[in-house]
Amino acid sequence: MTPFRTNVADLLHRPGSRRALRLEAPLPGLAVTGSAVPDDAPVAIDVLLERVPEGIVVRGVVRAPWDGPCSRCLRPVTGVVESQLQELFETEPLEGETYPLAHDHVDLALPMRDAVLLELPIAPLCRDDCAGLCPVCGRDRNDDPCSCEQTTPDPRWAALSQLEL
């Protein structure tokens, strides 16, 4: 059982009823290629649960801290993702479209995972103008520009240099 599983029996018995909910707890296993939410970091959800004829609608926002290496210079980068949620929980969910409403409970961890994973940066940057690492000597060009020869052509393109324009 996750800390994001909540009982909604009070809403199910009163059509049109609403309830605000704020939860915060770690949600391990949130990672993409370039960044990840630390497994022990708190992920917060601030939503409004509303009873509708189909089930329970959840509207609100999810926030999670993330970290990862800069994709150019490999320095550590951190940030916070924030994603809007508007999801429907129903007793007979449509795969990929709605979430399960099971025995008077909704598990908010399911849409939270989906929302955070879609927002995590795949290629984070420490700053927009990051110069990155020198491909010849490996020096961080943000700290110290190197004097390496940068005009070495890629041998894979050598055949193209023979073409006349």
Image: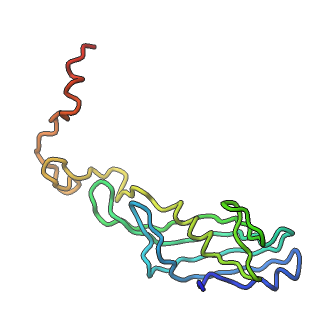
- Of residue 19 and residue 127, the one placed in the foreground of this image is 19
Q: Position of residue 91 (x, y in %)?
A: 78, 72
The image quarter containing residue 127 is bottom left
Seen at 44% across and 67% down, the residue is 31
User: Which residue is at the far top?
Assistant: 164
Q: How is the image coloured?
A: rainbow
Q: Position of residue 50 (x, y in %)?
A: 79, 73
In the image, 136: left or right of 122?
A: left
The image quarter containing residue 83 is bottom right
Seen at 16% across and 50% down, the residue is 145
Q: Position of residue 159 (x, y in %)?
A: 21, 24
Seen at 39% across and 58% down, the residue is 124
Q: In the rendered view of the protein, which quadrant contains the C terminus?
A: top left
Seen at 19% across and 49% down, the residue is 134
12 is higher (above) or lower (below) than 151: below
Q: In the rendered view of the protein, which quadrant contains the N terminus?
A: bottom right
Q: Position of residue 136 (x, y in %)?
A: 14, 47
